[in-house]
Image (tube, rainbow, N blue to C red):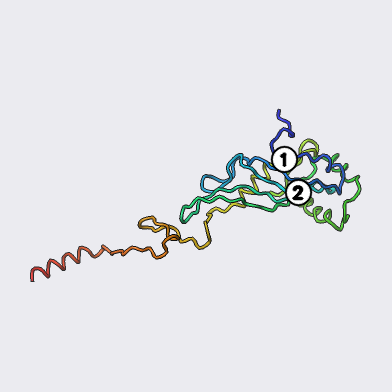
């Protein structure tokens, strides 16, 4: 059975989970997990995802405050131009302790900076709420935080469903496919052929006269 620490997305947090008020900075690159988008817009599996921030220990768990940046590939849905850019997303995520023992261990420690009027008070409210998409479990008795699901969920929600190369993209000509961004004056003289038969009949009558 694979161990939590063997995961490519595992971060050791045992040293800060021991008591409230501790902080651990993170500045690390992880491979993008599978399942982020598709061939139109998404993050390629294995691409470098940069996580910069910190884990802060409170009474009920750890708070990760970070900026996660991934290379997002996309295709403009109007003009079909390939797009590629680094996409940053700011996250604040709660990792609750998975056992009462780990919880009690943290509670017995010294309070962090600001005490109950600081960051602990803010996150105690989160800890009292029902588990949500912004809550992820700690593993191995609180020793590791696995960021795989967090990275996937973050970018599945953040990347646009209909990406554009620019907000005012003019798209392609529906007649010939020319990029109207490069030739804004491009147009076709469209003849309505619904009356072509009548025009032919009229010409025939005029010829008989």
Seen from this angle, which residue lies furthest bottom? Answer: 209
Residue drawn at x 65%, y 44% as measured from the top left: 49
Residue 74: percent from left, percent from top:
53, 50
Q: Which residue is mark 2?
A: 64
Of the residues under marks 2 and 1, which one precedes in the sequence? 2
Indicate whether 165 appears above or below 7: below
Left/right of residue 109 with respect to residue 160 in the rendered view: right
Residue drawn at x 83%, y 49% as measured from the top left: 58
Q: Which quadrant holds residue 209? A: bottom left
Indicate whether 195 appears above or below 27: below
Q: Which residue is mark 1?
A: 146
Left/right of residue 91 with respect to residue 82 in the rendered view: right
Disc 1 is placed on an element classified as strand
Disc 2 is placed on an element classified as strand
Residue 105: percent from left, percent from top:
88, 41
Left/right of residue 196 with respect to residue 28 in the rendered view: left
Screen quadrant of the N terminus: top right
Residue 146: percent from left, percent from top:
72, 40
Q: For the residue carrying disc 2, how many other residues have a C-alpha within 10 Å: few (<14), some (14-19), or many (20+)?
A: many
């Amino acid at each position: 059975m694979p161990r939590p620490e063997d995961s490519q997305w595992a971060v050791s947090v045992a040293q800060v989970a021991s008591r409230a008020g501790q902080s651990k900075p993170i500045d690390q690159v992880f491979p993008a997990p599978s399942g982020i988008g598709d061939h139109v817009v998404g993050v390629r599996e294995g691409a470098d995802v940069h996580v910069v921030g910190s884990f802060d220990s409170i009474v009920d768990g750890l708070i990760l405050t970070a900026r996660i940046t991934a290379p997002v590939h996309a295709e403009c849905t109007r003009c079909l131009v390939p797009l590629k850019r680094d996409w940053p997303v700011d996250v604040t995520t709660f990792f609750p302790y998975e056992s009462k023992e780990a919880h009690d261990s943290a509670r017995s420690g010294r309070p962090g900076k600001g005490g109950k009027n600081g960051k602990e008070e803010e996150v105690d409210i989160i800890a009292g709420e029902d588990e949500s998409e912004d809550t992820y479990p700690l593993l191995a008795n609180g020793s590791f935080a696995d960021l795989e699901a967090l990275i996937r969920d973050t970018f599945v929600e953040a990347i646009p469903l209909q990406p554009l190369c620019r907000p005012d993209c003019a798209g392609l000509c529906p007649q010939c496919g020319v990029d109207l961004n490069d030739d804004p004056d491009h147009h076709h003289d469209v003849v309505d052929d619904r009356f072509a038969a009548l025009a032919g009949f009229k010409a025939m009558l005029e010829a008989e006269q």
